[in-house]
Amino acid sequence: AQSVTQLDSHVSVSEGTPVLLRCNYSSSYSPSLFWYVQHPNKGLQLLLKYTSAATLVKGINGFEAEFKKSETSFHLTKPSAHMSDAAEYFCVVSDKDNFNKFYFGSGTKLNVKP
Amino acid sequence: DAGVIQSPRHEVTEMGQEVTLRCKPISGHNSLFWYRQTMMRGLELLIYFNNNVPIDDSGMPEDRFSAKMPNASFSTLKIQPSEPRDSAVYFCASIKSGGLAGELFFGEGSRLTVL
């Protein structure tokens, strides 16, 4: 079975500084990987996804993530945080044998200080 | 497209009452998922349907929970009888499955409080 580990449950940054949210996955093959964002009292929204094309994936709102197979990582970054980025972020891996099986990380809450 | 539509957005009920949550997936999507989100357990998959057929219900907590998908545009999640520990936000999500893994589209959730 696949699994996802989000290394930080909470991250706090100042507005205008870089954001790094860490994600490691376990998989015996090249998986499909996703980052979702959840704003308060909202559903989850896709930020970006990796499906074995370019290893550096660009998403919405200036976010990007790099797939590193050797490190089994898929960290999410943004050069400059905005107050509106404050939300919870979920790293997700899908099952190669069953593309309807999604494994969610436990989430990282991002706090952005003015 | 209106996205995944869930109702009610908020439900407050008393222990022992029946609760029915509803979901309309995005038109053309052939897989539908029910998730539950709590502070303690995070996001849990309860059940998913493919082409209206339940494929994996191993996440359904117990017999008090049941889910149906009578057609491609409607699904229900029922809890009978409800208990305080069922208090959570319940999300419905849909996807057009087939080929590479696609994007899950989530509804805004139904927040259930059982007193």
Image: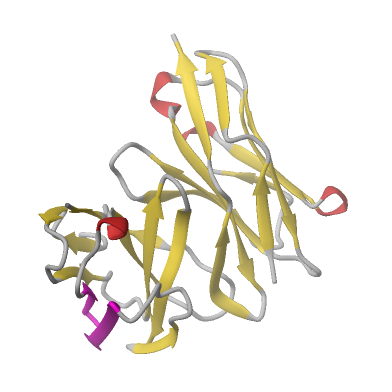
Is residue A46 visible to us here? yes
Q: Nearer the viewer, residue A60 or A14?
A: A14
Against A17, is B76 above or below? Answer: below
Residue at 27% across, 71% down = B25
Residue located at (39% from left, 50% from top): B38
The quadrant in which residue A52 appears is bottom right
In the rendered image, the quadrant that contains the C terminus of chain A is: top left
Res B29 → quadrant: bottom left
Q: Residue furthest top?
A: A114
Horizontally, residue A71 falls left or right of residue A41, namely right
Give the residue at x 37% y 60%. Answer: B36
Q: Quadrant of the N terminus of chain A?
A: bottom right
- Magenta highlight: main SS: strand
Estimate the x, y position of residue A95 in percent, counting from the top left.
Answer: 64, 72
Figure check: B46 above or below A9: below
Query: Toward the viewer: B15 or B19?
Result: B15
Q: Position of residue B73 (x, y in %)?
A: 21, 79
Side of A106 where B12 appears, left or right: left
Q: How far from the left and from the top, in percent, is residue B31? A: 39, 78
Q: Is residue B68 magenta?
A: yes
Q: Above or below — where is A4 with respect to A7? A: below
As drawn, A55 above or below A103: above
Q: Position of residue A79 (x, y in %)?
A: 61, 23
Q: Is residue A88 left or right of residue A3?
A: left
Give the farthest residue toward the right.
A70
Q: Which residues are magenta?
A: B64-79
- Please say whether residue B107 is visible from this viewpoint: no
Quadrant position of residue A6: top right
- Magenta run includes residue B65: yes
